[in-house]
Image (spheres, helix red, strand yellow):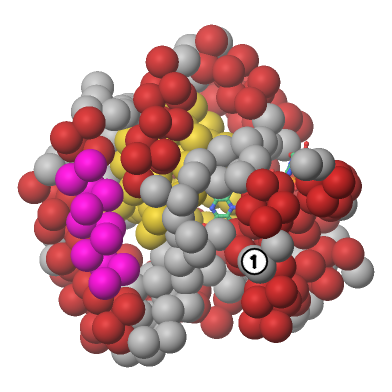
Amino acid sequence: MFRTFFIYLSKAAWARNIITGWNFAWRAASRFVAGETLEDAIRVIRQLNQKGINATLDHLGEHTTDLEFARRAAQEILQVLDAISLSGVRANVSIKLTQIGLSLDEGVCRENLQMILQKASALGNFIRIDMEDSPWVDTTLRLFNQMRHEQGFENVGIVIQSYLYRSEADIRHLSAACSRVRLCKGAYKEPQDVAYPRKADVDSSYDRLAQIMMDGALAAGCPALSLDGRLPPIIALATHDERRINFARRYARKIGLPKESLEFQMLYGIRRDLQEQLSKDGAPVRVYVPYGSEWYPYYVRRLAERPANLWFFISNFFRK
Ligand code: FDA
């Protein structure tokens, strides 16, 4: 109930208008968002890099409602790539296709994506395409495959969500093609005919998919993280769930997958202790660092994941 209600709020324009008008809401959100500017984000990434942790930078935004805004969003992502290159930080970039026009015009979205990948390729960087809710999964995978196989971009990766029934088949195709995949549980409210409703099933699907990915990476010769921290290994496990992480590490040891071939990813502001502990243990760790003024839906999805975060939000109201 709690999760359903907050995921509804994350999409509701009326709630967005009210909540983003409260000063204390931004104070609460800034626990999960690096700041409003690119400079804020680069500063946060430098701090992470000093601890041996890499980053993936997300200029927040989704479901852009106007083609001109979608083109502008794509231009801003080019600026993000330039800023990473100029500052020398160990970071790549995550994007959402609805931010660059997917919900308006697939052709414009494709052009924007191609332009972003060309720029990233010229700068030796990598773009991860985030996965959004289930109506966008087919098109997102289609555009990813076009870029990777028809346009020949090696510097692009995709995300798969373990709560979807279809994900095992998707992972098998992607693993056979040595595609770089980030595995997460899934952050949206999905109907029961497309996604497992029970958390236990989402978790066991996560372990099963992680195993398939690890077997695939071993068969592909275990490509590792690049020296500059930008091109990730084939497998990225994005979760803060220690049980999932421990399961994957045990399985990796059992099959002889080198540590450098298995990246762990977590969100900015969540389980910093675990991020640092894994990194000290020699595992590649990457933190997802979002920034920008469009923080509302991202932040409310973080509230949906954990009821305790709501108390943190409320406590900010009482702080001066
Ligand atoms: P789970 O929800 O079971 O939580 C495990 C533990 O993690 C909790 O007990 C708690 O300690 C901690 N935790 C989790 N969420 C928290 C929160 N919000 N606040 C505080 N503590 C929290 N989703 C998607 O649909 N498409 C995508 O492209 C991505 N991309 C992505 C990138 C990265 C790097 C990460 C880490 C996650 C995503 N996600 C995502 C989000 C993902 O699908 C999922 O919603 C969250 O990671 C929460 O699930 P966990 O795997 O952490 O497990």
Residue drawn 18% across and 50% down? 120
Q: Say if disc 1 is inside 8 Å of ligand 1.
A: no
- Disc 1 designates what residue? 20
Residue drawn 16% across and 35% down? 86
* Dominant secondary structure (helix, strand or loop) of the stretch shown in magenta: helix
Residue drawn 25% across and 76% down? 71
Q: Residue furthest right?
A: 1
Find residue 283 and report its horizontal and vertical position in percent.
49, 19
Residue 101 horizontal side relative to residue 114, left or right: right
Q: Residue furthest left?
A: 122
Find residue 204 and report its horizontal and vertical position in percent.
75, 48
Label 1 residue SS: loop
Q: Quadrant of the C terminus?
A: top right
Q: Residue furthest front?
A: 320
**In the rendered image, the vertical position of residue 125 relative to residue 129, given as above or below:** above
Q: Which residues are magenta?
A: 72-83
Residue 308 visible to an observer of this rendering: yes
Residue 320 horizontal side relative to residue 39, left or right: right
- For residue 269, what is the image quadrant? top right
Q: Nearer the viewer, residue 216 or 136?
A: 136
Residue 221 horizontal side relative to residue 247, left or right: left
Residue drawn 50% across and 64% down? 294
Count numbered badges in the picture: 1
**Magenta-drawn stretch contains 262:** no
Find residue 138 and report its horizontal and vertical position in percent.
45, 78
Q: Amino acid at mark 1?
A: Thr
Find residue 198 and report its horizontal and vertical position in percent.
85, 61
Q: Residues within 10 Å of mark 1 (few under 14, many from 20)?
A: some
**Magenta-drawn stretch contains 81:** yes
- For residue 72, what is the image quadrant? bottom left
